[in-house]
C-alpha cells in the first residue's frame, strides 16, 4: 500500500439528543458496506465507527464536533456518506 487513500475532517452533531443509539445505528448501517477503516474521535476518545458501542462511548452531545478519519480504497465515498448523514441528522425525525 504505497498510496493509501485517506480522508480527514469533522462533523457537528445536529441531533437534539446527541449521537445516541438510533442515529449511531443509522451511521453503522450506512458505513458497514465500505471496506475502509473509519475512526471517530471526540473528547479524547477514538473509536471504530463500525462499532455501535464504540460510537455510544463517545457520548457526543448536540453541538459536539466529531473528528472523522477514513483510510482505504473507498475512503472518499465513505467520508462523503458520513457527512451527508450528519447533515440529515442521521435520518432521525423527532
Image (cartoon, helix red, strand yellow):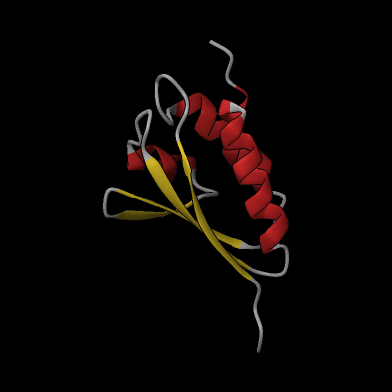
Q: Is 5 left, or right, of 19 in this rendering?
A: right
Left or right? Give the position of 41 relative to 76.
Answer: left
Q: Examine the rendered structure and indicate whether residue 22 appears above or below residue 94.
A: below
9 vs 85: above or below: below
- Judge whether residue 85 can be spotted in this image: yes
- Tell me what residue is drawn at x 34 percent, y 42 percent: 58
- Residue at 63% across, 53% down: 79
Q: Is residue 4 above or below residue 59?
A: below
* Image position, residue 64 (x, y; %): 36, 37
Residue occupying the point 41% across, 54% down: 47
Residue at left offset 39%, top offset 43%: 65
Residue 42 at what x, y percent from top left?
34, 48
How many numbered discs sit on the rendered protein?
0
State the image quarter where residue 38 is shown: bottom right
Q: In x, y percent, where is residue 19?
A: 43, 31
Which percent across, then down, holds residue 5? Answer: 66, 73
Amino acid at each position: 500500500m504505497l498510496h493509501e487513500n485517506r480522508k480527514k475532517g469533522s462533523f457537528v452533531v445536529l441531533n437534539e439528543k446527541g449521537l445516541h443509539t438510533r442515529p449511531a445505528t443509522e451511521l453503522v448501517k450506512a458505513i458497514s458496506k465500505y471496506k475502509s477503516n473509519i475512526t471517530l474521535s471526540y473528547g479524547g476518545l477514538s473509536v471504530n465507527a463500525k462499532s455501535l458501542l464504540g460510537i455510544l462511548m463517545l457520548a457526543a452531545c448536540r453541538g459536539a464536533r466529531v473528528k472523522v478519519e477514513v483510510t482505504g480504497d473507498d475512503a472518499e465515498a465513505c467520508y462523503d456518506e458520513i457527512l451527508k448523514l450528519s447533515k440529515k441528522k442521521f435520518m432521525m425525525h423527532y
